Image: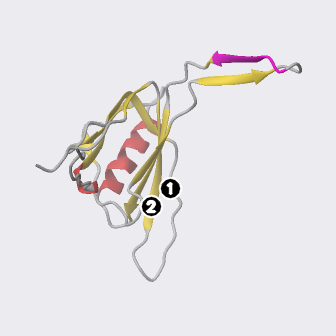
């Protein structure tokens, strides 16, 4: 018996920083997250394999927004608050697929720097980079259509 039909809607994937939902995504890839390897590996000259736990549970996010998105203002203000505070300012990050079971959170996140900026004949994109400290990750599936 089959698994049933499933449908994915990128509009149902919510990303927030500092409790504010980021909107105005550029076409193509909305966002991309990378996670470090939990274990590294060393191989000795005689082929003995050893692995070490990195305990690195951070994540790095690339957010691609339309240059017209008001969320650019939100991200700029978060970055400026971090830069203007003597010890910096971190904010929480939250990602959820509303129609699925994927849930990713981090209590500490910060914007790495300003996105590259260009002026073209057509509206372009701004790619922001967000670094997260310890990240709690559950990559799940998608709900079936009834």
Q: What residue is rendered at 33% in x and 60% in y?
A: 25
Q: Secondary structure at mark 2?
A: strand
* Rendered-image quadrant of the N terminus: top left
Q: Residue at x 44, y 61 (%)?
A: 126
- The percent position of residue 125, horizontal first and vertical second, equals 43, 65
Q: How are the colours assigned in the image?
A: secondary structure
Outermost residue toward the bottom?
121
Left-right relation of 39 to 138: right
Q: Residue furthest right?
A: 45
Point out the residue furthest to the left here.
146
Query: Is 99 placed left or right of 39 in the picture?
Result: left
Q: Nearer the viewer, residue 3 or 37?
A: 3
Would you call the spot at circle 2 few (<14 residues within 10 Å), some (14-19), or many (20 or more)?
Answer: many
| Depicted 58 relative to depicted 17: above or below | above
Q: In the shown orientation, is residue 111 left or right of residue 102?
A: right
Q: Residues within 10 Å of mark 1 (few under 14, many from 20)?
A: some
Q: Which residues are magenta?
A: 47-52
Q: Quadrant of residue 104?
A: top left
Magenta segment: does it hold 113?
no
Look at the numbered discs 2 and 1 and tell me whether their residues touch, using CB distance below 8 Å. yes
Reading the image, the residue beneath label 1 is 115
As helix, strand or loop, the secondary structure at mark 1 comes to loop
**What percent of the width, then of the height, locates residue 145?**
15, 50
Which residue shows up at 38% across the image and 66% down it?
Answer: 67
- The x and y percentages for residue 34 are 50, 40
Q: Badge 2 is on which residue?
A: 126
Picture residue at 31% right of the left edge, 62% below the top: 69
């Amino acid at each position: 018996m089959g698994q049933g039909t499933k449908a994915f809607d990128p509009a149902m994937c919510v990303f927030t920083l500092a409790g504010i939902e980021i909107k105005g995504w550029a076409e193509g890839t909305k966002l991309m997250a990378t996670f470090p390897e939990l274990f590294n590996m060393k191989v000795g000259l005689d082929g003995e394999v050893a692995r070490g736990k990195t305990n690195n549970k951070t994540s790095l996010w690339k957010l691609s927004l339309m240059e017209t998105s008001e969320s650019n203002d939100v991200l700029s203000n978060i970055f400026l608050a971090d830069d203007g505070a003597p010890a910096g300012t971190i904010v929480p990050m939250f990602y959820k697929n509303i129609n699925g079971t994927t849930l990713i959170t981090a209590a500490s996140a910060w914007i790495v720097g300003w996105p590259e900026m260009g002026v073209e004949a057509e509206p372009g994109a701004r790619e922001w980079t967000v670094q997260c400290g310890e990240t709690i990750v559950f990559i799940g599936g998608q709900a079936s259509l009834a």
